[in-house]
Image (tube, rainbow, N blue to C red):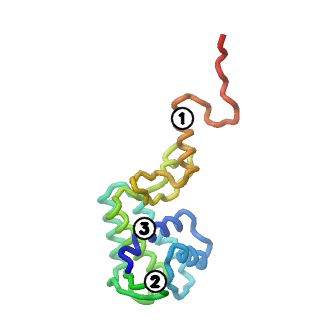
Amino acid sequence: MHLNPYGEYAVLLAASLANDMPEGRSGIEERARTFGMTMDFIPTPEDHELTRRVIEDWLRVVDATDPQERAALLNQQMAAAAAYPRLVDHDDEGWHLHYRDTNQGMPHVFRAIFSVGTALHLTTRGMHRLGRCAAGEDPGDPCRAVVVDVTRNGRQRYCSVRCANRAAVRRHRARTGAPSGNGQKPQRPSVN
């Protein structure tokens, strides 16, 4: 039995879609399967657009830094996707909970699992463990990737090692007064 099937994995799936939305519905479904979501959905022409809107709503939670505001937004999203939790056994996954009614469309199911999963993630790991890449806080850095902190110490601030390294180089250059990467080597003072 799964104790928390919609916590970490649902939040990681939402972040993956937010950071790199696939072109079409089939790409979204393939990504969902990559993150362990095996339910088949009856396709509709609006699935891609409605899923994009679900992600946009979810990003409001990501961008809310105040825990009260974050909780209020999540509560609104969970209320919009409200359904009785159901015990199900499908696709050889074993018995687990679904937070949705039977035969709902992909976007509605995503709203339910993303909101419930995010609520579980934040309440079990900490309300601060979801946000944007800290590299994007620096002027001129374009990174706006979502970071889901699943580390033991709860201090993950960057979406990748590359962003963390870029930020470290900027901090180093700011401390030492080194040029900011214009391609020229810094001039060393002559020693007499």
Disc 2 designates what residue? 93
Q: Quadrant of residue 125?
A: bottom left
Quadrant for residue 96, please give it.
bottom left
As displayed, is residue 75 above or below residue 158? below
Give whichever of discs 2 and 3 has the lower sequence position. 3
Pointer 3: residues within 10 angstroms few (<14), some, or many (20+)? Answer: many
Nearest the viewer among 60 and 168 is 168
* Residue underneath mark 3: 8
Cα–Cα gap, marks 1 and 2: 49 Å
The Cα atoms of the two marked residues, 1 and 3, are separated by: 34 Å
Kind of residue at disc 1 = His
- Which amino acid type corresponds to the residue marked 2 in the rendered image? Glu
Secondary structure category for the residue under label 1: helix
Q: Sequence order check: which comes first, mark 1 or mark 3?
A: 3
Q: Position of residue 103 (x, y in %)?
A: 45, 89
Residue 48 appears in the picture as rendered: no
Residue 91 in percent (x, y) is at 49, 87
Q: What percent of the width, then of the height, locates residue 171?
A: 52, 37
- Extreme residue in the left direction: 68
Mark 1 or mark 2, earlier in chain = 2
Quick one: SS at disc 3? Answer: helix
Q: Is residue 120 left or right of residue 158?
A: left
Q: Secondary structure at mark 2?
A: loop
Badge 1 is on which residue?
A: 172
Q: Which mark is residue 140?
A: none
The location of residue 114, given as percent across then percent down, is 42, 71
| Residue at the image position 56 percent from the left and 39 percent from the top | 169
Q: Residue at x 37, y 81 (%)?
A: 1
